[in-house]
Image (tube, rainbow, N blue to C red):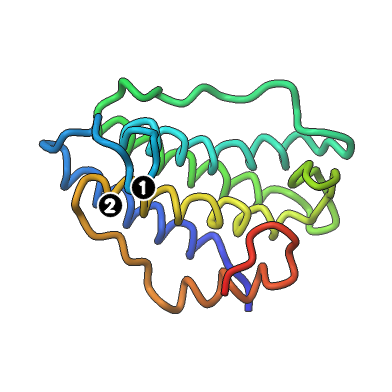
Amino acid sequence: MTFTATDLRHLGDQASTAWRSAADRDWAVPAGTLDWSCARTADHAVDTVLAPAFFLASRRQDDYPPYGAATPGADAGPAVLAEALETAVRILASVVADAPPDVRAVIWRRPQVETRPPADFLPRAGLELMPHCHDACAGLGIPFEPPAAVCDRLRHHTALWPHWPLA
């Protein structure tokens, strides 16, 4: 099973809708069990989707590119964070769609540099987006429950990956 751009869009839409629904809540509170605030965690979630787009678009084989795009920052309001997440999802989906399937780029550096094809950059973002959105929503006291089918596709796509074992 493959985790697709549609799956990532669904996660992004679900998260941005949840964040907008909590616009009147205190975003300075800790995100779930983290030390980070909900706002900082949401901003980081945006970065975890945007960064893989730069990794793939750079076509670098040796390291992450030494540049990227700025996120709105932890001082941004919920509406801006939600819009930034939606934008980041569209950017990554577009970069993946534009890349020939035989292109490879660095997808992570630890425990060693590894390159992967375009289709793997979507679940790379999903693996980060899902827990960060969950943490932010937990801190805000709102639900974030991705559909089981999306979780299953993410789990199956990444089952042999060395980093994020999903039980």
- The percent position of residue 18, horizontal first and vertical second, equals 24, 51
Which amino acid, by three-letter code, is at mark 1? Thr
Q: Residue at x 40, y 52 (%)?
A: 12
The nearer-to-camera label among 1 and 2 is 1
| Residue drawn at the location 81% of the way across and 47% of the way down | 111
The residue closer to the viewer here, 164 or 80, is: 164
Within 10 Å of disc 1 (Cα), the crowding (few <14, some 14-19, many 20+) is few
Residue on which the image places disc 1: 33
Dot 1 falls on a residue whose secondary structure is: loop
Q: How far apart are marks 1 and 2 (CA)?
A: 9 Å
Q: Is residue 155 above or below residue 61?
A: below
Going from N to C along the chain, the mark reached first, 1 or 2, is 1
Image quarter where the C terminus lies is: bottom right
Q: Position of residue 87 (x, y in %)?
A: 43, 39
Q: Is residue 23 above or below residue 129?
A: above
Q: In which quarter of the image is residue 31?
A: top left
Three-letter residue code for mark 2? Ala
Q: Is mark 2 on a helix, strand or loop?
A: helix
58 lies left or right of 36 = right
Residue 85 point in image, percent of width and height: 41, 41
Q: Name the residue under label 2.
A: 138
- Kindly check if marks 1 and 2 are in contact, taking CB atoms under 8 A apart as contact: yes
